Image: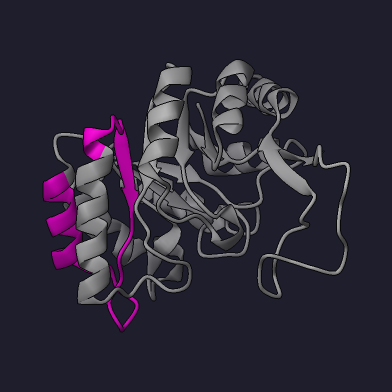
Amino acid sequence: MMEVCIDSVASAINAEKGGAKRVELCGNLMEGGTTPTVGMLKVIKKKVQIPVFVMIRPRGGDFLYSDLEMEVMKQDIEELKQAGADGFVIGLLTTDGTVDKDRCRELIAQIRPLPVTFHRAIDMTSDLLSSLEVVISLGCGRVLTSGGEASALDGAPVIRQMVDKASDRIIVMPGGGIHERNLDRILQSTGVKEFHCSARAAESSAMTFQKGGVSMGASLSPPEFSVKVTSVSKVKRLIDVAGEIV
């Protein structure tokens, strides 16, 4: 089963058209995904039928959050839950690189009865297999991981270990650098049943006047006159590859 990470209404529509079974809604994918707006979720829920899981992450950077950021996350969960979220995606760590069990429990209690995915914060922990046990004990239904490496392909051996350790207690879902040229190797080597990717392609801006030399972002800003949107054809190709493996 394919989950597509998205940051726009167009991407949600294209993901569903391509055959994805679920989307993870984020803002700011340039920073790995942050909490999206309530307005974005409300419009997407009107346009697609597949489940929409929502990222809860108040900023980019590490996963160690202050009391104020915790307050923001709780407020976001309340409003996004009311707006129709089908599930949530969270991940909080302590200073020593372990899963912050207490704060995760607080957020999960607020999210229930909706399902929870623990995101790639697990890849930043000091011990992935020990962290997996903690995530299972918290009652998360899924864990998104690249196996602690820069990409799911590089982390495939560890993902396999996580799948074996998890058994049927949680769904281990690989994500990070997945595309149609490596998906078959990842699925075959890990034994997973679900996978996560963006399947995006660049689309040129419709602006006829395009001013150069000025950027609205910082040094790692994307091009001003190009936007990445989930591609229907890419989603279909990835699902075809997965179908051949299964």
The residue that appears at 72% across and 45% down in the rendered structure is 227
178 lies left or right of 170 = right
Q: How many marks?
A: 0
Q: Is residue 115 visible in the rendered structure shown here? A: no
Rendered view: 51 above or below 226:
above
On whether residue 94 falls in the magenta region, the answer is: yes
Q: Residue at x 78, y 42 (%)?
A: 202
Q: Residue furthest bottom?
A: 96
Q: Is 168 on the left or on the right of 5, as rendered?
A: left
For the question of whether residue 53 can be seen, the reply is: yes
User: What residue is drawn where x is 18% and y is 43%?
Assistant: 111
Residue 97 horizontal side relative to residue 139, left or right? right
Residue 233: x and y in percent read 74, 23
**Residue 104 quadrant:** bottom left
Q: Position of residue 99 (x, y in %)?
A: 27, 68
Magenta segment range? 81-110
Q: Is residue 118 above or below residue 220?
A: above
Question: With respect to residue 10, does 224 lie above or below?
Answer: below
In the foreground, 215 or 184: 215
**24 in magenta:** no
Q: Specify the quadrant of the image occupied by residue 157.
A: bottom right
Res 50 quadrant in image: top left
Q: Position of residue 100 (x, y in %)?
A: 23, 69
